Image (tube, grey):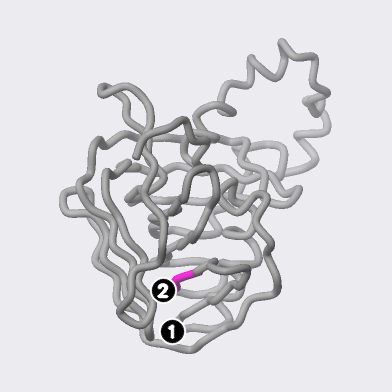
Amino acid sequence: MTRPQLSRRRALQAGAATAAGLAAGLALPSIADAADDPGTDPARRKVVLVGANPGIQLFDGDTVTAYASVWTVDWSTHGAGAAIVLWHDGRVRVLTDHPALGSWLERTFTRFFPEADGLPWPEPRIERRAVHVANDLARGTHARAGDVTVRISEVLDRRAFATDDFDLGGRVHSLSLVTGPSAAGAIEVRGRSLPGEVVRSGPPERPSSSAFVAVAEVWRL
């Protein structure tokens, strides 16, 4: 299925150019303000998370039917571990081997991603489950926890990305990663595939997709 889609990675690409903000006449912090506030001075931001965060949205036409955000955290200010954040049918589940970490990932990151924009997003149900994730740019992502399985496959491209302007609920972060938009994916609950399809867009030389692998992901605040 192919149609234009503003995924998180495409939103990052669209918003990365500071010159565009200047041309639009946006009010930007002064140099003096930036010197006093590490949140507005990218050079002074500290690493808060190192890991990977592949994700998948499924669509029925223009309607999002399901969204899964898969996390593997090698190091963070809230520890290491893994989590699957699943939105489906107006509910949010966080399946994780470290509940405090999983709650922080959902509360600080996933709920503010563009994929979640416009979705009813109630307080999540935190479920302590062992999480198993295989994730690489060659084969894609296979994650499972409890009764949930996420598969992302047929990686179409591999490209690096970096921005200092990723807004998460009013807190601007720096982000760098390597992403791999992918042609296929599925979310299963209790052995049954959730409805919806992966959406692809973009030219062959620079494809985009609502399913993507991500590695070498570093967030700074």
For this view, does 101 lie left or right of residue 29?
left
Residue 82's disc is 2
Give me the residue at 60% from left, 54% from top. Answer: 116
**Residue 220 in picture, x, y percent from top left:** 56, 50
Q: Secondary structure at mark 2?
A: strand
Q: Residue furthest left?
A: 138
Give me the residue at 41% from left, 45% from top. Answer: 210
Using the image as rendered, state which of residue 167 and residue 198 is in the foreground: 198
- Residue type for callout 1: Asp
**Secondary structure mostly taken by the magenta-highlighted segment of the chain:** strand
Q: Quadrant of residue 182?
A: top left
Using the image as rendered, state which of residue 35 and residue 74 is in the foreground: 74
Magenta span: 81-85
Give me the residue at 80% from left, 40% from top. Answer: 36
**Residue 57 in picture, x, y percent from top left:** 45, 53
* Image vertical order of residue 84 relative to residue 21, above or below: below
* Image vertical order of residue 54 relative to residue 29, above or below: below
Q: Secondary structure at mark 1?
A: loop
**Residue 83 among magenta residues:** yes
Give the total number of marks visible in the rendering: 2
For this view, does 43 lie left or right of residue 151?
right
Residue 215's disc is none
**Residue 105 in picture, x, y percent from top left:** 56, 67
Residue 97's disc is 1
**Residue 73 in picture, x, y percent from top left:** 42, 67
